[in-house]
Image (cartoon, rainbow, N blue to C red):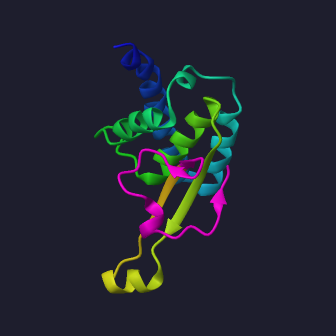
Amino acid sequence: MARRCRQVPVAARSAVLCLRFKRVLQQQGYTAGKQLSEQLSQRGGSQSATLEPDQIGHVVHRVAGLPLINATCLPRSLTLYTLLRRAGYEPVLRIGAQPREQARQQQTQMAHAWVEVEGTAVAERVEPFVTFRSDRAETP
């Protein structure tokens, strides 16, 4: 029960941040979203510091999937990155794309954004680097 109580503020912040990042990305693009994440990450500590990265990640993923929010991987990852930094972790934002040969076979180009802490993808169902190549880390 105590863990759920700690997750409520994280869920509320996740909802607000997902919607904000979604709007900024649609209207102003990735660079503006990255800058906003940097600004928001520098503001004081957070109650989410008592939660592990995967716990924060699962809350963000659940909130991002709500019909009202419906955030794709990039606003969701920017939200998670921001909350993890505010909680005192050192996350890395990764953006990757399928290799060309794989995209040709599937006749679609896919990309994905995710967050890692200490080299491990946070709250991802599968390891994204298996499907998506990321040559460099994005640090907003």
Q: Residue 109: give x, y in percent of width and height.
A: 41, 76
Q: How far from the left and from the top, in percent, is residue 60? A: 42, 37
Q: Is residue 38 left or right of residue 50?
A: right
The quadrant in which the N terminus is found is top left
Query: Is residue 124 visible from the viewing direction of this image?
Result: yes
The residue range painted magenta reads: 116-140
Q: Quadrant of residue 88?
A: top right
Q: Residue at x 67, y 52 (%)?
A: 139
Residue at 38% from the left image edge and 86% from the top image edge: 104
Magenta-span inclusion, residue 123? yes
- Among the 4 quarters of the image, the one containing residue 31: bottom right
Compare residues 98 and 68 and report the one nearer the observer.
Answer: 98
Which residue corresponds to the image point at 60% horizontal and 47% vertical from the top-left? 118
Q: Residue at x 39, y 80 (%)?
A: 103
Given residues 105 and 88, the one toward you in this image is 88
Q: Is residue 61 left or right of residue 47?
A: left
- Indicate left or right for 32 with 70 as reference: right
Which residue is more in the foreground, 119 or 100? 119
x and y, in percent, of residue 100 in the image = 46, 83
Is 23 left or right of 85, judged from the image as shown? left
Magenta segment's dominant SS is: loop
Looking at this rendering, what residue extends furthest in the left direction? 67
- The x and y percentages for residue 19 are 46, 39
In the rendered structure, does residue 86 fall within the stretch colored magenta? no
Between 29 and 43, the one nearer to me in the picture: 43
From this viewpoint, is residue 29 visible? no
